Amino acid sequence: MPAIAIGPLADETGIKIPTIRYYEEIGLLPSPPRSRGNRRLYPMAAIGRLRFIRHARDLGFDIDAIRQLLTLADQPDHSCAEADRLARIHLDDIESKIARLEALRDEVRHMVADCAQDRIRQCRVIEVLADHGQCRHDHPPASSPVINNR
Amino acid sequence: MPAIAIGPLADETGIKIPTIRYYEEIGLLPSPPRSRGNRRLYPMAAIGRLRFIRHARDLGFDIDAIRQLLTLADQPDHSCAEADRLARIHLDDIESKIARLEALRDEVRHMVADCAQDRIRQCRVIEVLADHGQCRHDHPPASSPVINNR
DNA sequence: TCTTGCTTCTCTAGTCGCTAGAGATTGTAG
DNA sequence: CTACAATCTCTAGCGACTAGAGAAGCAAGA
């Protein structure tokens, strides 16, 4: 039966070789059989699976969510409510990140707009950073990254 | 002269103790003098410096940009064109992140909206992920994270 | 003075999702 | 048979922290 080596697989899917091995290591992609010389020989189905992973990563799903989505994708008779739920959670997440980034954008925009371009002594950028009281918005909730995917 | 220990300093600035030590380690905050018992005793000015750092981090500036901004802030007679430039670069960055997130949001939104909530077999979420051809947008430029601050 | 308990110290390791490099082996084309 | 490319494993690094161990310092009350 047809098989594909890791290099061509990387070319096919746009995922780098070390990343493919990394996905195997963390159990996202099953370990493929090996050649006599110990090289990975993937079944052609691996292409689809990796493309799925890549696409989900591009859409900002984290590895854990992808793991769940893959499990779901493997059970065609299962209800898709769970997949829907995962996607909705992710959507909420994206929306809140956008909202927070927009607040940042407005703040930085004001900072830049107010700068008279003279000496540091009167620089609005520096001033605003030094004194939170000059801010137009509150501190964000300290934890929770604005985003953290690639 | 008055000094402040690391704990109260953390309380004052909202930056956690290990993070303050980390900032020292990477040279963002100068090493303070120590007590006889080897504890850090910060000059009161450290409060302002850390608040500056915290605020800039909250606004999404990365450590390197903050390092540059701090250097600038220490030179009141210097032109503020450079601070302005840094802020503008950062603004562009934020704006492009927003744009990319909005594209993601639209895509995920469509995925969710189109899902009939039936079996996995017909699930739009899974389907779209499995087949990039069903996408409403292109792959992003593969590298470049959407964002990566806290 | 002693004890209790909080604070701080250093050090190491873990997080996430990769990426890069060393040095050894395997496979293939000429 | 010889190059050279592809792949192997292993370790370490990125950014910006966070968590925990185990030891030591310090202040207040008995």
Image (cartoon, coloured by chain):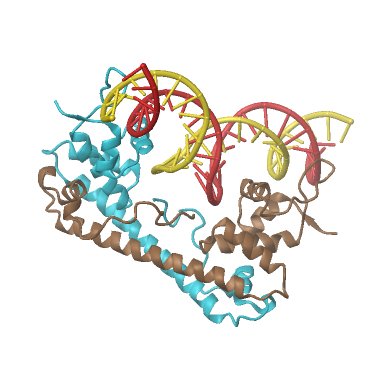
Chain colours: A cyan, B brown, C yellow, D red
* Residue A144 locus on image (x, y percent): 46, 53
Kindly identify the residue that appears in the image at 73 percent across and 53 percent down: B30
Residue farthest to the bottom, as pictured: A116
Quadrant into which the N terminus of chain A falls: top left
Horizontally, is B86 left or right of B129 in the view? right
* Residue B117 locus on image (x, y percent): 13, 50
Name above or below for residue B94 compared with residue B41.
below
The quarter of the displayed image where residue B76 is located: bottom right
Name above or below for residue A50 compared with residue B11.
above
Query: Which of these two is toward me, B117 or B22?
Result: B22
Kindly identify the residue that appears in the image at 27 percent across and 21 percent down: A35
Horizontally, is B78 left or right of A79 in the view? right
Horizontally, is B13 left or right of C20 in the view? right
Residue A87 visible in this rendered orientation of the protein: yes
Name above or below for residue B111 compared with residue B22.
below
* Residue A69 locus on image (x, y percent): 24, 42
Kindly identify the residue that appears in the image at 50 percent across and 66 percent down: B90
- Numbered marks: total: 0
The quarter of the displayed image where residue A73 is located: top left
Residue A137 visible in this rendered orientation of the protein: no
Horizontally, is A147 left or right of A52 in the view? right
* Residue B70 locus on image (x, y percent): 66, 63
